[in-house]
Amino acid sequence: MRKIVFALATCSILASCVKEENKNPIDVSKTTYLMDGKWQLKMSTIVKDITDPLSFPEDTYAVLQECVKDNYFQFKSESLVTDYENVRCQKDQPDYRDLYYALEANEGYLKIWLDPENPDGSIVLAGDISYLSIDTFQVTYVGRNPNNEDLTSRFVKTYVKFK
């Protein structure tokens, strides 16, 4: 009889310790993901000629100026992002600039621009966005090679979150 009473007491104690299920829904939107932290460029590559099967990704992050490497984005709302420049490349430039952004194509395409009156004419960054982990995303886009206008290149920029 003691064993049964002990077993019932143990079960009731364990049952009272079980966590209640959280009934609050979790916002898993990519906008919320972007707004949760500051995002700094940590890797940048280029495939100089996408039509050449022997062309391979080359590191472009290593040659960036230090004053560019410390910049970061902070997504403030569903349409506003601020580009912060910790160490300014030119002393007469402001520490930050407010930009606009949109997630398009089912949150798979990121577009950031400067002029609200001319979004397509003032693009700062635009491309397919991949969410690699909880603290890393990547933007991939195709454009003219900066050193040879006859070539089409693929650019990949990887951003990492910091608090």
Image (tube, rainbow, N blue to C red):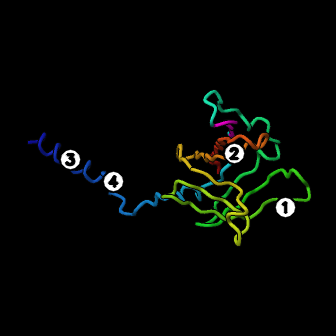
Q: What element carries label 2?
A: strand
Please tell me which of labels 1 and 3 falls first in the chain.
Answer: 3
Which residue bears the numbered disc 3? Answer: 11
Please tell me which of labels 2 and 1 falls first in the chain.
Answer: 2
Q: Is residue 56 left or right of residue 91?
A: left
Q: How far apart are marks 1 and 3 (CA)?
A: 64 Å
Q: Is mark 4 on a helix, strand or loop?
A: loop
Q: Distance between the residues labelled 3 and 2?
A: 53 Å
Q: Nearer the viewer, mark 1 or mark 3?
A: 1
Which residue bears the numbered disc 2? Answer: 41
**How crowded is the residue under tag 3: few (<14 C-alpha within 10 Å), some, or many (20+)?**
few
Which residue bears the numbered disc 4? Answer: 19
Return the mark for residue 94.
Answer: 1
Picture coordinates of residue 109, whole percent (x, y): 56, 55
Query: Amino acid type of disc 2?
Result: Leu
Quadrant occupied by the N terminus: top left
Q: Residue at x 30, y 51 (%)?
A: 18
Please tell me which of labels 4 and 1 falls first in the chain.
Answer: 4
Q: Which residue is drawn at 73% across and 58% down?
A: 83
Picture coordinates of residue 38, whole percent (x, y): 66, 53
Query: Amino acid type of disc 3?
Result: Cys
Q: Which of marks 2 and 4 is in front?
A: 2
Please tell me which of labels 3 and 2 falls first in the chain.
Answer: 3
